[in-house]
Image (spheres, rainbow, N blue to C red):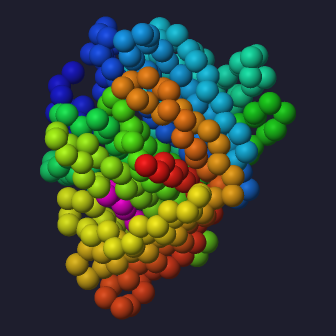
Amino acid sequence: MNKLFLMKNPDLFQGEKYLTKNTNYFEGWYFKNTNRENGISFIPGISIDNENKKAFIQVITNNSSYFVDYNIKDFKCDFSPFCIHIGNNSFSKEAIQIDIKDEMQNLNVHGKIRYSNSKNINTSSLYPNIMGPFSYIPFMECNHAILSMKSDAYGAITINDTNLNFDEGLGYIEKDWGCSFPQSYIWCEGNNFQKSNASFMLSIADIPFKLFHFRGIICVLIINNQEFKFTTYNHTNLIKYELNNNSLNVILKKRDYSLTVESSANIVNKLSSPVKGKMEKDIFESISAFINVTLKKENTVIFSDKSLNCGLEIVPK
């Protein structure tokens, strides 16, 4: 499939050519679902390294996490319309259908969630996704795309004996692909703000780039239909960067605008992340964190609100 077409449609499977090679590669989609009290996220993906090829689904709840292996032959991806299939599970921007049984982990998950009224970031030929012009650089170790900042969710998921109802819930979808996650980074996401119809995502990572490294920033705040981006490629400066256990305090500045972000989590759960295609590095994520976001223009506060049921990962050096 045409490379430029794939770049402009990052939801689609980018790594079909790697299925018949031994090149180190991973690709994973992230589907987060929340209601007022609970959340559950699914990460379907593939992992390819010199030793083996496999498909997988990671499951994250407020209090637990699971990694379920599948044969690579169980992975299929439809391009039009986009849909991922792993075993009896399917994932698209319109719905997810879950049917996971893993006796070794005493795990039984099934159900369906539908998505509607999806809102995403503004894109263009120069900025095909949140990575902007960096999307066109072929040797990036990790590529990131936001597929839905916020959508209405309807349905239910049963995990073991617990039923999670997501009618009038919220969805968030993103993905990553390449060979390795950054060695150190922070990531947080929230779309369940208390006083406003807003959605937010921030990631700051140590990015390898040829012979040197740089600190890459991607951040977007959408308030109703107004978008504010703070990124490396639009000359955002990192004014404050404090990490403490499972909390962070960040201040970004771009021209007359400044953005203050505070996030913290009480409970984190173990996930696996890719190193040269192999899912072997332990990281820790919460989907029950909170995020405080304050946006100022010069000295005037134009937005200040708190989001609950947020995603938070902190991977220090």
Let me know if residue 230 is in the magenta part. Answer: no
Residue 315 screen position, x and y as percent: 48, 48
Position of residue 58 relative to residue 101, above or below, is: below
Q: Name the main secondary structure of what is drawn in magenta.
A: strand
Residue at left offset 50%, top offset 27%:
280
Residue 92 screen position, x and y as percent: 47, 33
Residue 223 screen position, x and y as percent: 43, 70
- Find residue 114 and report its image quarter: top right
On the question of residue 239 being in view, the answer is yes
Let me know if residue 221 is in the magenta part. Answer: yes
Residue extending farthest right: 161
Residue 227 screen position, x and y as percent: 34, 67
Position of residue 300 relative to residue 204, above or below, is: below
* Left or right, residue 217 beside residue 284: left
On the question of residue 198 being in view, the answer is no
Residue at left offset 32%, top offset 68%:
238
- Find residue 13 and report its image quarter: top left
Residue at left offset 44%, top offset 10%:
52
- Find residue 98 and report its image quarter: top right
Position of residue 156 relative to residue 55, above or below, is: below
Q: Nearer the viewer, residue 273 or 5?
A: 273
Looking at the rendering, in which quadrant would you find the N terminus? top left
Q: Which residues are magenta?
A: 217-224
